[in-house]
Amino acid sequence: MSTQEENMKAYWKMNLLYLSVLLSIWFIVSYGCGILFLDTLNEYTLGGFKLGFWFAQQGSIYVFVVLIFVYVYLMNKLDQKFDVDEK
């Protein structure tokens, strides 16, 4: 196997790791905070709404948008590391 092929395998392995971690975070926030931990979170309020309700309605969306920016940042760094970035 050539060095280029090994680099591409390492690149895609890191890409899939990033995707797995970021999507896991989103799942935990959206499913966990919006459904599983609802009763515990509802003991607190945010902007006049129960925190569990807020996560179910808006929080998971905000977290998803932040995760998109984190993914873009990580992929730009990864592209530079493996010299596949747009120049």
Image: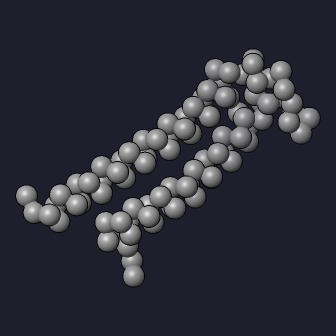
Left or right: 55 with respect to 75?
right
Quarter of the N terminus within the rendering: bottom left
Number of callouts: 0
Q: Position of residue 17 (x, y in %)?
A: 38, 45
Residue at (36%, 47%) from the top-left corner?
16
Q: Position of residue 13 (x, y in %)?
A: 30, 49
Farthest right residue in view: 48
Residue at (39%, 62%) from the top-left corner?
78
In the image, residue 18 sits, relative to residue 8, either above or below, namely: above
Q: Quadrant of residue 52?
A: top right
Farthest left residue in view: 1
Farthest top residue in view: 39
Residue at (37%, 52%) from the top-left corner?
15
Quarter of the C terminus within the rendering: bottom left
Look at the image and name its color scheme.
Answer: one colour
Q: Quadrant of residue 68?
A: bottom right
Residue at (72%, 35%) from the top-left corner?
55
Q: Quadrant of residue 81?
A: bottom left
Q: Position of residue 34 (x, y in %)?
A: 68, 29
Q: Position of residue 26 (x, y in %)?
A: 56, 39
Left or right: 84 with respect to 67?
left
Left or right: 69 with respect to 40?
left
Left or right: 65 with respect to 71?
right
In the image, residue 29 sits, relative to residue 73, either above or below, namely: above
In the image, residue 2 sits, relative to residue 51, either above or below, namely: below
